[in-house]
Amino acid sequence: MTEVALLIKTFSRDAGYVRRLLDSVRTYNTESLPVHLIVPKDDLSEFSPLTENGLHLHTDEDVAGRYLVTESAHGLSPGYLNQEIVKLAFAESGLAANYFCVDSDAVFIRPFTGSDFLRRPGEPYSVLVQDKELEVEPMYYRDHWCGRMEAIRRIMDFVGLDDPIVRTCHGHQVFSSIVIRSFAEEFLQPRGWSFTDAIREVPYEFSWYNMWLLKSQVIPVHPIEPLVKVFHNEDQHLDYLLRGIGLEDLARAYLAVVVNSNYSRDLGEVSADGDKFSLVGGYLSYAELLSVIGSKARDTFRRRLGS
C-alpha cells in the first residue's frame, strides 16, 4: 500500500481528455506518485496502450463489482452513479492509504509531491469550502445550488452532523481509506447499506465522505481550499480570459485546472490557456465578440483622453 496516489475514473468517451491529463502528470509528478486509472471492462482496449509509463489500469468490475448498478436514479445514468461508487470502493483495494481523485478533464499546471496532499502520513488535507462564489451566481443558484444544498443537508441528517455551516467540495478531494472504511463499518453496515445504497439515496460521493469525516473525526481534519481551479461554466472561464489570467497566474494557487467538459465538450478539449482571442471567440458569437472589442476600445480611448 502506498501512502498517497492519484485516482482517475473515466470511460472511452473521455479518452482524449485522459491522454492530455496523463501528459501533464508525466510532466509534473516529480515524486512519481502511483496513478490508478479505472475504466469499464468494455473500455480496456482503449486505455491499455497507456500503461507503458507505469500507469496502473483497473476495471470498474474489479474495483467495485459487487456494488455496481444497472438502473438509473435521480435522473442519473448507471454509468454516472457507478463512477461515484468506484471512487468510494477503491478504498477497499488496499492499494493506497490516501488517494487524490482527479477528473478526466483536469490538467496539472505545476510540479506536485505527496506533501501537497498530506499534512503528515495518515493525515490528508481535506478540501472543505462553502462555495460562496457559486452561491452568488444567479444562474448557478437557480439551476444547481438549491437542489444541491437540500441533498447535502440530507446527508448531514443521515450521519447526524449538526452544523449550520455546509462545508464540502464538488470533487478533487483527497480520500482517506481510513475514513471510508469507518464510513462503511460504522455507518453503512449497521443500516444494512453498502456504497450502492448511499449513492442511490443521495448521489454525492464527496459529500458523503466529507460529512462522515466531519462527524466521525476518525482522523484529524486539516481543511484547505481547493487544489484545482474548476471553471464550472463558460462565464467563469470568460471572466478569467478577459482579465488576462493565464496558467502562470493560476499555478501560484492551484495544482491543476479544469474547464468543465459538461459545457465545453462541443468546443473540443478546451484549454485554460492559449490565445485569448481564439478562446473567447469559441464562446461568443461574432456580434458578442465585436461588442466586447468595441467596449474595450471605448474604455481605452476614455482612459487616454483622461491622461
Image (cartoon, helix red, strand yellow):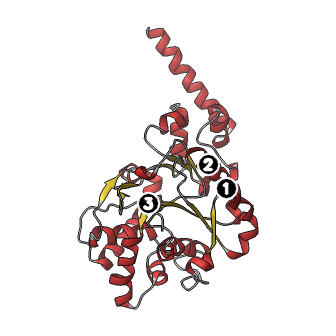
Left or right: residue 16 versus residue 177 is right
Determine whether the residue tagged by mark 1 lies in a helix, strand or loop.
helix
Mark 2–mark 1 distance (CA, rounded to whole Å)? 9 Å
Q: Are marks 2 and 1 in contact (CB under 8 Å)?
A: yes
Write the residue at 54% across / 74% down. 86
Q: Residue tagged by mark 2?
A: 26
Nearest to viewer (mark 1 / mark 3)? 1
Residue 182 vs residue 54, the one in the foreground: 54
Closest to the observer: 24 or 215? Answer: 24
Is tag 2's residue or tag 3's residue first in the polypeptide sequence? 2
- Whether residue 124 sits left or right of residue 102 in the image: it is left
Q: Amino acid at mark 3?
A: Gln
User: Which label number is shown at residue 91?
Assistant: none
Position of residue 289 in the picture relative to residue 237 (left or right):
right
Name the secondary structure under disc 3: loop
Residue at screen point 57% across, 53% down:
260
Q: Which residue is mark 3?
A: 173
The x and y percentages for residue 111 are 51, 43
Q: Secondary structure at mark 2?
A: helix
Q: Is residue 127 visible?
A: no
Where residue 159 sits, quadrant-wise, is bottom left
Q: Tell me if label 1 and label 3 are in contact, CB under 8 Å.
A: no
Residue identified by numbered label 1: 53
Q: CA distance from mark 1 to mark 3?
A: 24 Å
* Residue 255 pos. (x, y %): 48, 46
Between disc 2 and disc 1, the foreground one is 1
The earlier-in-sequence mark between 2 and 1 is 2
Of residues 64 and 258, the one nearer the viewer is 64
| Kind of residue sitting beneath label 2 | Arg
